[in-house]
Amino acid sequence: MTAIASDHEARHPSGRPDVLSTISGSWSRRHIQGKAPPRMPTSTDPSPIGSPTDDSTGSSAPASSGPVPSLNGEAPPHPEQALPGTAGTRPGSSAPSPGTDAARTRRSAWAALVLLVGGLSTGVVLALVGGPWQVLAVLHLGALAIWFLVWRRSWRDLLRSAGPRSPWLLFAVGASLYALSAVAHHPIDNPGAVLAPVTPTGLLSALAMALGVGVLINAVPEELSLRRCLLEPLRAQFGGGFALWTTALAFVVMHLPTWISSHATVSTYAAEVPEKLLFGLVAAWSVLRLDSLAFALGMHVGGNFTGVLLDCLSREETLTGWSRFTAPSVIAMVTETLVTAAAVWFLGRPSSTSASHR
């Protein structure tokens, strides 16, 4: 053992310091400084084999009171340094405390109320004076800002579906029910509607309109904003009932600028307002009962896509526009509400798998 081990030679191929090489290197440095290397104990030594001795005197050495180096060559943490997650953790390096999370929830809930009241009121006033009420779409960006920046939630939380049923099943059931409802409503709301001759170009245009306007511009943003980004902090702060009624009423007011700018009749308001209110109540209840946005999103996507598609495939001159308050429309509205509510109740029952686990 006459070779001097350099720092490069004392390293393991994996990049970690090698214990034996480190010992060899420290022994070689002491040898260079003029100290003789420690000899191996023999049977004639006064001290037993294995007892610690000093290199120069051979006397018993006291146990070191300093920290023992770890095998990777790094010094152990100081005894006063707390482990992550303990009281000694530096601020910002651990999960927020319950008090911090409660403060965020409170701020988010009040911000949601301010956004709903202020944003929707502005949209209605602009519609009444003939202004650009379409700026109401900024409400969706505000809802996302509350979710990510104020409440500090993630994309995973935004799309979370923690109920007992598959989100794909919930979406499919909700979409199917309201697609059928749109098919039933179309001849009731447009008694003289006649389908136009279908051409490949016309069909593609109708599909694009139904997907773009009915789904991407209206259904998806409205559900993410009302029934997720705003409902959840309101539910956490004020309770499920408050969140349900607040978002349902907001869903009605959100459509007021469209009706106002279209010069809707009293009969239209009498049909559309309760229909939108019932839709908002059932959709919000589905989120609370099923612990998932999937069913409500399916309701909105299925109804909007089918309704816009049928309108685009019909002759424009045969369409009457909005719903009207008639006996058939009331029957259809009540029927779709009861059937959908029954489906939400049934899907919200504990599944056999979860029941067996309990």
Image: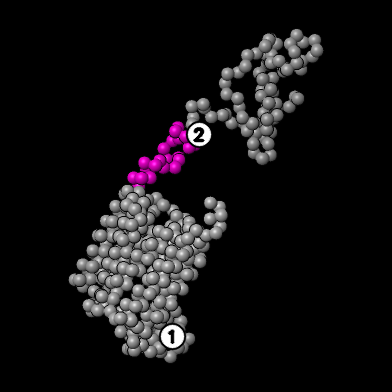
Identify the coloring: one colour
Query: What residue sits right under mark 1 in the picture?
Result: 202
Q: What whole-number distance in Å separates the C-alpha atoms at marks 2 and 1? A: 66 Å
Q: Which residues are magenta?
A: 83-104
Residue 131 seen by the camera: no
Depth check: 57 or 303 in front? 303
Question: Residue flagged by tag 1: what amino acid is it?
Answer: Gly
Residue at 39% from the left image edge and 70% from the top image edge = 338
Task: Identify whether 273 is placed above or below 202.
Answer: above
Residue at 42% from the left image edge and 59% from the top image edge = 289
Q: Quadrant of residue 281?
A: bottom left
Depth check: 186 or 121 in front? 186
351 relative position to 15: left or right: left
Query: What residue sits right under mark 2 in the picture?
Result: 83
Question: Residue flagged by tag 2: what amino acid is it?
Answer: Leu
Q: Residue 74: percent from the left, percent from the top?
A: 59, 31
Does residue 88 show up magenta in the picture? yes
Q: Residue furthest right?
A: 43
First-in-chain label (2 vs 1) = 2
Mark 1: which secondary structure? helix
Q: Quadrant of residue 286?
A: bottom left
Q: Quadrant of residue 213?
A: bottom left
Residue 341 seen by the camera: yes
Task: Identify whether 206 is placed above or below 357.
Answer: below
Q: Residue 355: percent from the left, percent from the top?
A: 53, 55
Task: Identify whether 12 is placed above or below 340.
Answer: above
Residue at 40% from the left image edge and 77% from the top image edge = 181
Looking at the image, how many numbered discs can be counted on the residues? Answer: 2
Q: Residue 208: percent from the left, percent from the top?
A: 43, 77
Which disc is residue 166 wearing? none
Mark 2: which secondary structure? loop
